[in-house]
């Protein structure tokens, strides 16, 4: 990639980020991202964009108001027999071509193999990297929605925001709850009553109050993601400098990395809390550093990309640790027909309480349709009333039978 091309890419990233900070800096009640859709930026086949590309495409989705995080190259569009819409401009994504050579022998090995080596063995290799760019388009920049309307509706349904509430009516994230309950993060997460929300670099521990201490469930999860982002900087993981002093430039940089990482991960999980006033003012303080040195922003976005990828990788791995009840609720909210079918095949039957919760917390038509098709469940008050009457009648019969023995 030429120097001029690299500078142009950084300039675009900078303008995008400065515009976003100005928005949240002047209106601190505005979320980082507008509630529009959930999901990780990906291509049409479902391969996720990683690192800085995931962050940049998320920002672009926000700026243009795209309804899904699905992108494609012009070549991929051609393979689908669709054209790019007139006057639509591509979005640049970056990829690195890594050549890895052993220092003593000069033998070349695949980069994927190098990544699996421990740190000591990696010292025996030399990496030569070359950065290149690809142009991609969001699916809405193409004729795809017009040519394949049914598939387009399915894609939109897949990434629709579907909120779930707990028994106290607060926002619920089954994946993050499972991560906390099973202590599957890279460091312990301790919930304790109090005012502390922090990552202790000394003890390698996250401390956060329980969710019911927060005004909104969304604020609990975003605060947790912020501290999880800090913890990724530990020397055993992404190795950022966390030994910083409050108010120093390095402290500000680390805070911006954590703030952006929690915002990006929150969007992809469907969590949209309002930004706090003090954070909005803090963001405005970063504008000078970003505009005076665009490379500063590029380095931040690169770190955000790595931190958010690590967090998302761990969160998505939580499905295997979920209780069967949480698997059902999560699959129902996501309208995941495949998962719901698998649960039915192993004999799972949702309880009336779970059905009531779903009826209360979602009116999403994809969820309604999928539950009807898999479990023959209708999410409507009349159905629940009938089910309750049937349940009460059955309980009465059981009690009568018991008394007659």
Image (cartoon, rainbow, N blue to C red):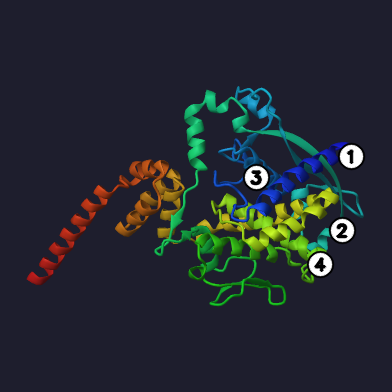
Q: Is residue 85 above or below residue 333?
A: above
Q: Nearer the viewer, mark 4 or mark 3?
A: 4
Mark 3 or 2: the one toward you: 3
Disc assigned to residue 248:
4
- Badge 1 element: helix
> What residue is pinned by disc 1?
3
CA separation in Å, label 4 and label 1: 31 Å
N-terminal label among 3 and 1: 1
Q: Earlier in the sequence, mark 4 or mark 3?
A: 3
Q: From the image, state whether disc 2 or disc 1 is nearer to you.
A: 1
The Cα–Cα distance between marks 3 and 1, rounded to whole angstroms, is: 25 Å
Q: Residue furthest left?
A: 404
Q: Residue visible at 53% across and 24% down?
A: 146
Q: Is residue 140 visible?
A: yes
| Quadrant housing the C terminus | bottom left
How far is the residue under mark 2 from the one under mark 4? Answer: 36 Å
Q: Which residue is mark 3?
A: 58
Residue located beneath label 2 in the image: 124
């Amino acid at each position: 990639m030429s120097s001029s091309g690299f500078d142009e890419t950084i300039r675009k990233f900078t303008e995008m980020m400065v515009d976003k900070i100005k928005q949240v800096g002047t209106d601190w009640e505005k979320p980082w991202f507008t509630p529009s859709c959930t999901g990780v930026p990906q291509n049409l086949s479902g391969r996720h964009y990683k690192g800085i590309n995931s962050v940049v495409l998320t920002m672009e989705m926000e700026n243009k108001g795209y309804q899904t995080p699905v992108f494609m190259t012009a070549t991929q569009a051609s393979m689908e027999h669709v054209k790019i819409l007139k006057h639509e401009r591509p979005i640049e994504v970056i990829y690195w071509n890594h050549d890895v050579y052993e220092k003593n022998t000069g033998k070349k090995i695949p980069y994927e193999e190098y990544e699996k080596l421990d740190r000591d063995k990696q010292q025996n290799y030399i990496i030569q990297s070359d950065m290149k760019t690809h142009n991609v388009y969001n699916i809405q920049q193409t004729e795809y929605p017009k040519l394949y309307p049914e598939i387009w509706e399915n894609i939109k349904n897949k990434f629709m925001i579907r909120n779930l509430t707990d028994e106290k009516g607060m926002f619920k994230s089954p994946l993050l709850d499972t991560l906390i309950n099973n202590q599957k993060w890279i460091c312990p997460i301790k919930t304790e009553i109090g005012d502390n929300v922090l990552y202790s670099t000394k003890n390698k521990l996250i401390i956060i109050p329980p969710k019911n201490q927060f005004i909104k469930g969304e604020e609990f999860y975003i605060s947790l993601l912020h501290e999880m982002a800090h913890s990724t900087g530990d020397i055993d993981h992404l190795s950022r400098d966390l030994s910083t002093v409050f108010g120093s430039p390095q402290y500000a940089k680390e805070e911006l990395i954590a703030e952006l990482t929690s915002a990006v991960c929150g969007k992809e999980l469907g969590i949209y809390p309002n930004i706090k006033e003090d954070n909005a003012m803090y963001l405005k303080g970063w504008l000078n550093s970003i505009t005076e040195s665009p490379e500063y922003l590029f380095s931040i976005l690169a770190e955000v990309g790595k931190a958010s990828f690590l967090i998302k990788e761990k969160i998505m791995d939580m499905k295997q640790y979920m209780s069967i009840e949480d698997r059902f609720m999560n699959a129902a909210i996501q309208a995941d027909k495949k998962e719901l079918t698998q649960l039915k095949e192993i004999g799972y039957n949702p309880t009336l309480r779970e059905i009531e919760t779903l009826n209360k917390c979602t009116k999403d038509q994809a969820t309604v349709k999928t539950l009807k098709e898999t479990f023959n469940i209708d999410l409507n008050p009349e159905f629940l009333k009938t089910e309750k009457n049937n349940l009460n009648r059955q309980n009465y019969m059981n009690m009568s039978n018991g008394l007659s023995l």
